[in-house]
Amino acid sequence: MKRAVQLQTDPQTAPPASGSNFDDFFAEHRIGLFGALWLVTRDRHEAEELAQDAFVKVWERWDRVRELQDAEGYLYRTGMNLFRNRRRRVALAHLAPQPGDEMRTIDDRDALVRALGRLTPAQRAALVLVDLVGLTSQEAGRALGVRPSTVRVLAARGRTILRQQIGGFDGSP
């Protein structure tokens, strides 16, 4: 579920953001954010780390975030963005040379390049823009000149082919 995040134009008429001070906001949303991240990561420790990082980022911008109509949505989006960025770094780390295991690195890269070569150019472009570059399907759709739903379908089909070819993608083993 996506939430629109917009600044309030008139603080007198707009409803206050959930929890006007950060401590209240944290107390109200910490369990929900952790639960959502735990479901996504399937790892308690990673979910705790991501939730803490998300709250730190919100706290650093609290003077602006508390004025948002949907500060909770901003918090959840921040947490999910941190998760996607971490997943992307893990995927890219698998492509980076590992010291002492150059042959395995070469083999892994070769397998990935071959698997990517089996994708259609549109699938490959969607997959790279969404999963490696980190664009949203809407941004990738604009870049490719297609609808966001088309980007999602292309990327999903590409992931399926990669899983069949090399046994994992999206940061999974």
Image: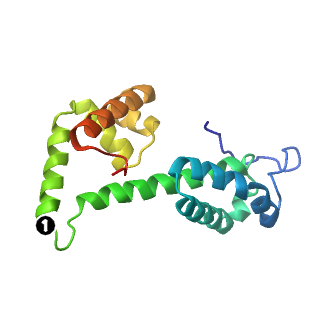
On the image, the x and y values in percent for residue 61 come to: 66, 64
Which quarter of the figure has residue 22? bottom right
- The secondary structure type at the circle numbered 1 is helix
Q: Amino acid at mark 1?
A: Glu
Q: Is residue 42 above or below residue 150?
A: below
Seen at 65% across and 68% down, the residue is 60
On the image, the x and y values in percent for residue 156 come to: 37, 32
Q: Is residue 137 above or below residue 27?
A: above
Image position of 84 (left or right of 107): right
Query: Is residue 77 shown to the viewer in this render?
Result: no
Image position of 16 (left or right of 77): right
Seen at 64% across and 56% down, the residue is 34
Location of the N terminus by quadrant is top right
Q: Is residue 45 above or below residue 68?
A: below
Query: Is residue 48 shown to the viewer in this render?
Result: yes
* Residue holding disc 1: 102
Q: Is residue 102 above or below residue 135?
A: below
Which residue of the protein is positioned furthest toward the bottom in this rendering? 100
Seen at 72% across and 51% down, the residue is 71
On the image, the x and y values in percent for residue 136 come to: 45, 41
Choose between 85 and 112: the one closer to the eye: 112
Which quarter of the figure has residue 30? bottom right
Which quarter of the figure has residue 154? top left
Seen at 26% across and 33% down, the residue is 161
